[in-house]
Image (cartoon, rainbow, N blue to C red):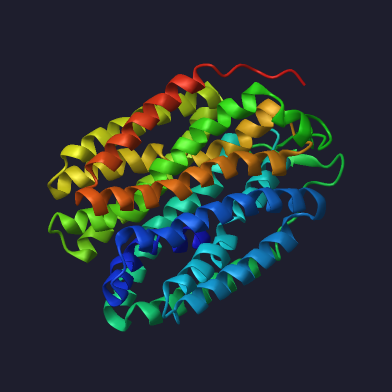
Amino acid sequence: MVSFGTQYSFGVFFKPILNEFGWTRAETSGPYSLSMIVYGVLCIVAGRLSDRFGPRLVVTLSGLIAGAGYLLMSQISSLWQLYIFFGIMAAAGTSTYVPLASTLTRWFGKRRGLVNGIAVSGVGLGIAILPPIATNLITSYGWRTALLIVGGALLASIMITAQFLRSEPDKGEPTKADNGKVESKSPPSDEGFTMQKAIRTRQLWIICIPFFFSGFFFQSAMVHIVPHVTDLGISAITSASVMTVIGVIGTTGRISMGYISDRIGNKAMLIISFALVSVSFWELLIAKELWMLYLFAVLFGFFSGIGVLVSPVAAEYFGLQSLGVISGIVTFAWAIGGAIGPTAAGNIFDVSNSYFTAFTLSAILSLIAVIILLQLKPTHH
């Protein structure tokens, strides 16, 4: 909730920073794109380290570095500083996603989708809560003080909660089913593919490409939806409410997607999600009034949180042996898409003075992802 909610508050800091320094939208989007690349790399590193040392140490260090990044970001005077403090340091906070998701998947043999959905609903909750709080802080105290408050809260909350993490059940210890009863002995963590073997499979790349597209359209929307709505003549606080709807609906969506995927399968859930995200972008292209923007927020918010399926998909197709690092590879693909998307959308706006082409591209990529996922076949351990 805290790490992703803070990251996705970048959209509400976007125009205040833009107005103070006079940078272009593409330049101001650049640090966000860099943060996605760094996030992707750190997810692989964090997954690998979590496989070896457990999540407590990894998440603690990530919270420390990210919190320091936001605190330093409040003092920037040049563009390069924004690249360092937000683009590199703050990205460490969101890299906690892989250690946390893979830890849950190790603890629960059944209902992995639901369990991850409950945890990852924190992303939606963060989007719902933190951007409006940040907007009000900016309005009351200015963007620099707002960053000090947000950064301090992130540093303290992540480092404290990390101390309660436990890597996995002891060998042979019963894991818990969703009804609270013991379900089975804990699944052996040495079963499945090694990272080297997984990389050589066709299935890993069929999974990675749609996640790349997801990163592109998700991060483009999260950075540019508030500027887009304000460009339509809607106030900054009301525009931030569109992000709130995305977050609130996303909370429900992530839990629901996890629950449904346990019943219809991860592949089917991914295909449905990509198809309906495409519908949401086609609707956004014609949205001029607030109720139409809220409709986009509902559709997009509910079905765009496919990150909830990263760890369950990795476990289903590749087992638990290298779950952290394989989940990190899939997340890296998502992050590279997320790095390209916001800057591409910013460049498109700078050239055309419109987001129309960027949103059209997002709709098309979602449909291509559906076609690719239809080719996904089971692996053989």
Quadrant of residue 128 within the rendered picture: bottom left
Number of marks in picture: 0
Residue 315 image position (x, y, % from top left): 68, 32
Residue 245 relative to residue 218: left or right: left
Residue 274 image position (x, y, % from top left): 41, 30
Relative to residue 378, is residue 9 depicted above or below? below
Res. 278 visible in picture: yes
Query: Is 21 or 366 nearer to us in this picture?
Result: 21
Relative to residue 245, is residue 151 depicted above or below? below
- Which residue occupies 85% across, 47% down? 170
- Which residue occupies 30% across, 69% down? 18
Quadrant of residue 321 within the rendered picture: top right
Query: Is 338 or 346 nearer to us in this picture?
Result: 346
Query: Is 192 or 248 nearer to us in this picture?
Result: 192
- Which residue occupies 32% across, 35% down? 361
Residue 108 relative to residue 185: left or right: left
Split into 4 quadrants, where in the image is the C terminus? top right
- Which residue occupies 64% across, 41% down? 329
Q: Farthest residue in the right direction? A: 171
Residue 202 image position (x, y, % from top left): 64, 22
Residue 83 relative to residue 107: left or right: left
Residue 183 image position (x, y, % from top left): 73, 33
Relative to residue 324, is residue 136 depicted above or below? below
Res. 115 visible in picture: no
Residue 305 relative to residue 134: left or right: right
